[in-house]
């Protein structure tokens, strides 16, 4: 019997009939299901019947062999944090916007559950960035699947982000901020900052300044093994640091040390997954 954990966001308006079907399909198959309690409460409040056989959990169930994330890419990021360093495959079913990480639709549910049951999913190892710094708040999860961004805070002034790579000076970025993105995050904030789209399984990191006050500052792709050190200065003495959208305010001058995390997020894809097809369908790549 496969043990499946399921988590999701609490903004699923318009999807409740399909979500009931998903719950029914899970119950009919040979699965043992651990549903996040807050998701179960939300679904019940909206008329979805949750079988008594489902175990409701708050902490991640250590028995789980596979995880379903229900929501958009933002939800997938939160589910990745829930799974932590366990390297358990996560399948994203999309009820959000475009859906790069959560790329499947509720209409495919039965097929997807068949893939999980038959162990036929393709697993892509997705790299994360780890941040080390004295400035990290004590309970802050120091990993990012998309990106680490250093941003101006509390003022309209620019920040200057002093960047070093592997102990050598790289540049002082005078800008609204600097996005250090994984290949997974390349279609997120990095893309808005003018950075390149990277094939998600590449081993590299991209540094993309946000509105740089210089014509020579361009996005830069460096090796995934790079150790990156960042230090911000600003007229306002403070900057904001964001990891996948979770952020804190940091005093300027503190150092952030970024490197590749020792574990990966295991993203589950259909066996026929194809990055180029995803780009064409989600980004309308090449459409005129
Ligand atoms: P949010 O600000 O509410 O939403 C950010 C948007 O980014 C959502 O539409 C989300 O998709 C999408 N997204 C997240 N990861 C993505 C990925 N890997 N590829 C393509 N699109 C992606 O915040 P959130 O939902 O908590 O997500 C946090 C992420 O927002 C950050 O990691 C950062 O990349 C991104 N962000 C982007 C900008 C910008 O582009 N100007 C500014 C701030 C933050 P769904 O709707 O499917 O959830």
Image: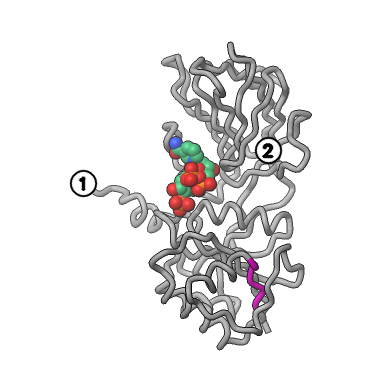
User: Main SS of the magenta segment?
Assistant: strand
Q: Residue at x 50, y 75 (%)?
A: 112
Q: Given the current orientation, which residue lies at the most extreme front position?
A: 45
Depth order, front residue of 248/284: 248
Residue 43 within the segment the image draws in magenta: no
Q: Rate crowding at label 2 as few (under 14), some (14 to 19) or many (20 or more) other CA atoms within 10 Å.
A: few
Depth order, front residue of 278/36: 36
Relative to 182, is 141 on the left or the right?
right
Relative to 31, is 102 on the left or the right?
left
The percent coordinates of residue 68 (x first, y second) are 58, 67
The percent coordinates of residue 97 (x first, y second) are 40, 54
Image position of 66 with respect to 158: above or below: below
User: What residue is pinned by disc 2?
Assistant: 225
Secondary structure of residue under mark 2: loop
Relative to 277, is 259 on the left or the right?
right
**Which picture quadrant has residue 80?**
bottom right
Q: Given the current orientation, which residue lies at the most extreme top position?
A: 235
Q: Which residues are magenta?
A: 33-37
Q: Residue at x 65, y 68 (%)?
A: 37
Q: Residue at x 56, y 18 (%)?
A: 159
Q: Residue at x 50, y 77 (%)?
A: 48
Image position of 191 with respect to 79: above or below: above
Earlier-in-chain disc, 1 versus 2: 2
User: What residue is pinned by disc 1?
Assistant: 288
Residue 34 within the segment the image draws in magenta: yes
Residue 169, disc: none
Secondary structure of residue under mark 1: loop
Q: Quadrant of the N terminus?
A: bottom right
Depth order, front residue of 50/270: 50
């Amino acid at each position: 019997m496969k043990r499946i954990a399921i988590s999701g966001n609490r903004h699923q308006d318009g999807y409740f009939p399909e979500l009931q079907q998903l719950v029914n399909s899970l119950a009919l198959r040979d699965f043992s299901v651990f549903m996040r309690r807050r998701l179960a409460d939300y679904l019940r409040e909206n008329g979805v019947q949750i079988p008594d056989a489902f175990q409701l959990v708050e902490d991640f169930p250590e028995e789980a062999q596979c995880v379903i994330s229900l929501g958009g890419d933002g939800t997938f990021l939160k589910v990745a944090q829930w799974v932590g360093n366990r390297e358990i495959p996560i399948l994203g079913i999309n009820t959000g916007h475009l859906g790069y990480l959560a790329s499947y639709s509720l209409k495919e549910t039965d097929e997807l559950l068949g893939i999980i049951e038959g162990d036929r999913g393709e697993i892509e190892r997705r790299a994360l960035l780890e941040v080390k710094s004295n400035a990290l708040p004590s309970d802050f999860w120091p990993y990012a699947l998309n990106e680490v961004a250093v941003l101006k805070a509390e003022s309209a002034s620019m920040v200057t982000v002093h960047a070093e790579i592997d102990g050598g000076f790289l540049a002082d970025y005078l800008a609204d901020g600097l996005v250090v993105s994984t290949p997974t995050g390349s279609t997120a904030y990095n893309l808005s900052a003018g950075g390149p789209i990277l094939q998600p399984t590449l081993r590299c990191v991209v540094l993309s300044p946000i509105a740089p006050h210089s014509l020579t500052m361009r996005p830069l792709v460096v090796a995934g093994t790079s150790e990156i050190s960042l230090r911000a200065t600003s007229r306002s003495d403070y900057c904001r640091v964001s990891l996948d959208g979770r952020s804190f305010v940091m005093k300027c001058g503190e150092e952030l040390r970024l490197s590749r995390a020792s574990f990966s997020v295991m993203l589950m894809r259909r066996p026929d997954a194809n990055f180029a097809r995803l780009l064409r369908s989600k980004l309308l790549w090449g459409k005129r």
